[in-house]
Image (cartoon, rainbow, N blue to C red):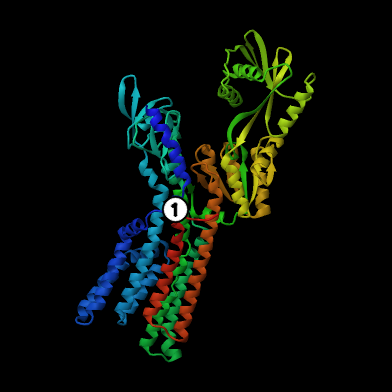
Amino acid sequence: MQAKAVHNPVSMTRKKANQPQPRPPRRTVILRLLRHREMLLALGSGVLMLAGWGAAAWSGTLSIALYIAAYGLGGFVKAREGLQTLYRDKDLDVNLLMIAAALGAASIGYWNEGAMLIFIFSLSGALESFASDRSRKDISALVALKPETALKVDGSGMRTVAVEELIIGDLVLVKPGEIIPADGVVSSGGSSVNQSAITGESIPVDKGAGDEVFAGTLNGEGALYVEVTRPAEGTLFAKIIALVEQAENEAPRTQRFIKRLEGSYAKGVVAMTAILLLSGPLLLGWSWSLTFYKAMVFLVVASPCALVSSVMPAMLSAMSRSARKGVLFKGAAYMDLLAGVKVVAFDKTGTLTSGSPVVTEVVAAEGFDRNQVLAACASAERLSEHPLARAIVSHAEEEGLELDTAEEMKALPGWGIEARIDGTVWRIGKADASEPGLPDDLKESIQRLANEGNTVSVIRREDEYAGILALRDQVRPEAKQAIRQLQKLGIATAMLTGDRGETARAVAGEAGIDLVYGDLLPEDKVRHVSKLRSRYGHAVMVGDGVNDAPALAAATVGIAMGDKGSGAALEVADVVLMNDNLERVAETIQLAVRARRIVMQNLTFAGAVILLLIAGNFIQGIPLPLGVVGHEGSTILVILNGLRLLRNRIAL
């Protein structure tokens, strides 16, 4: 009864998964923002500023006291950051410039303008901090889901054990609402499992007997008995945690340049302010009060707040959004590099293809029955663990053929196997179209199937040719769509594989790949990646195996398959596809392009506002409140522009 209950919702879940998913409620994001510590301090500063302005009409002392409180509440975090930079790095940053400008405004009686500067500056800082914290939570909050214990079931009953004690083959019970403690296969029971922390899927997936489940995912309403297939240190969840812990928070090139510029720029602004204070009365004939006022306006409008905030909110938002979809970045620099990619190279086996061969055709020689040939071949291969053997046996079982017990099975080195079945000797081995005595129709079939990328085996009964059997690794269904999406973006595609040329060309033709390179050793893959970089400028390599690790490291950006990828590939890769969905490659590249476009918009806008305000201060003269609103307002605008990338919808 339970198996039936589990079966039907699967199709319903798949139908739901194909429907557009609703965006997270905007109210939830606003509530999170309002609970953010820096945002609360900024808003408190704003309330005190308004209270000080209102109290000015009937009590100057109370008004100033409220303004001082607003300065302290809104400026504490930024003043601390600025002083830490000054003490630790012996350098000035934008935080101290803003605090100095606010104190300068207060010193000449502009308490309200100084408080407004502090309020807007702290507000923009809170927005940037919120973007950074949200990205960090999206990428690493799953660490909090790390399972600690499991309910192990054995001959003595049930007992709670540490997940580190679980070994392959152990049986664990996962109760409703509990976190699955280990990677495994459902032995019995049925439930829906929330896999969003691992694969990015927003809809829970129904699981029944024989289905794979992952550690760190959340069980739904049913109980599951899970047979452990990986030890704790080898689970997919453990790989994710390792990635997060070793992530290098490397800033993109643009941000690194701005950070290097910030210290020199801040010193330049301070120097220009000092020159203005000295030259105003002496050279320009301004009064001391006018000179100091203009110097404070210059200190406000020339500060690089908006420039500094132009890059990271956009990049962090893009990384956060990617993490929600199962794409992990090891640093923002790789998001920036991905925007300039012009070619994507793929490994074949396990990346473009499923990595599991299937029987594509069985051809019986004249006088032999196809089912008889297939059944004999499967019976002979039944005890072998070779992937090709398992594929043959599986195909025969799917066709409902009855298999016999093979006797006297032995390997024929360099060729194949031999087995006695019902007293008859059958041999299955490597097909060679030039083999003497091979019937012409089988020769033609061997050549045709080999040209289509199949691995072809010849089957003999005693000394007679009984037929041939063809197997091929199948192109993953989403691979073709992923290639089309990349080509639609104007990005060339290549395939680098160690498989023979005929197979490589057949698979590339089916998938729609532009460039094909076969018969490659790991060092050959590195050489071809270098050539692609020389030709196109930036190149991405997508792979899953140990032999792909050198090429992943050589590429501008290496992308590893997170589910079935090797530890070596995950270690050297810059980006990880946690659900192995190749369609995410094109989506992520487009997101990176959009993030770079927003960064350029921000930098252009921020630079234009600074130049306009500086020119206005010297040519016409602008009020300090207008300078505060113009400069800090531009900072808030560039941050909000970057946060747009947190929205889910993006068109390909």
x%, y% of residue 107?
A: 31, 80
Total marks in image: 1
x%, y% of residue 305?
A: 43, 69
Write down the quadrant of residue 527 in the picture: top right
Q: Quadrant of the C terminus?
A: bottom right
x%, y% of residue 494?
A: 65, 46
Vertical position of residue 242 compared to residue 112: above or below: above
Work out whether residue 283 or residue 624 is closer to the camera in this orientation and state it.
624
Say which element carries label 1.
Answer: helix
The amino acid marked with disc number 1 is Ser
Write down the quadrant of residue 572 in the picture: top right
Q: Residue shown at 44%/46% (left/top)?
A: 244
Query: Does residue 390 appear anywhere in the picture?
Result: yes
Looking at the image, residue 533 sits to the left or right of residue 210; the answer is right
Looking at the image, residue 274 sits to the left or right of residue 597; the answer is left
Work out whether residue 474 or residue 10 is closer to the camera in this orientation and state it.
10
Write down the quadrant of residue 196 in the picture: top left
Work out whether residue 430 or residue 282 is closer to the camera in this orientation and state it.
430
Mark 1, residue position: 320
Label 1 neighbourhood size at 10 Å, few (<14), some (14-19), many (20+)?
Answer: many
Q: Quadrant of the N terminus?
A: top left
Query: Does residue 214 appear anywhere in the picture?
Result: no
Work out whether residue 110 or residue 487 is closer to the camera in this orientation and state it.
487
- Outermost residue, bottom side: 285
Q: Residue shown at 73%/14% (left/top)?
A: 464
Vertical position of residue 189 compared to residue 327: above or below: above
Q: Residue shown at 62%/33% (left/top)?
A: 473
x%, y% of residue 290?
A: 38, 87
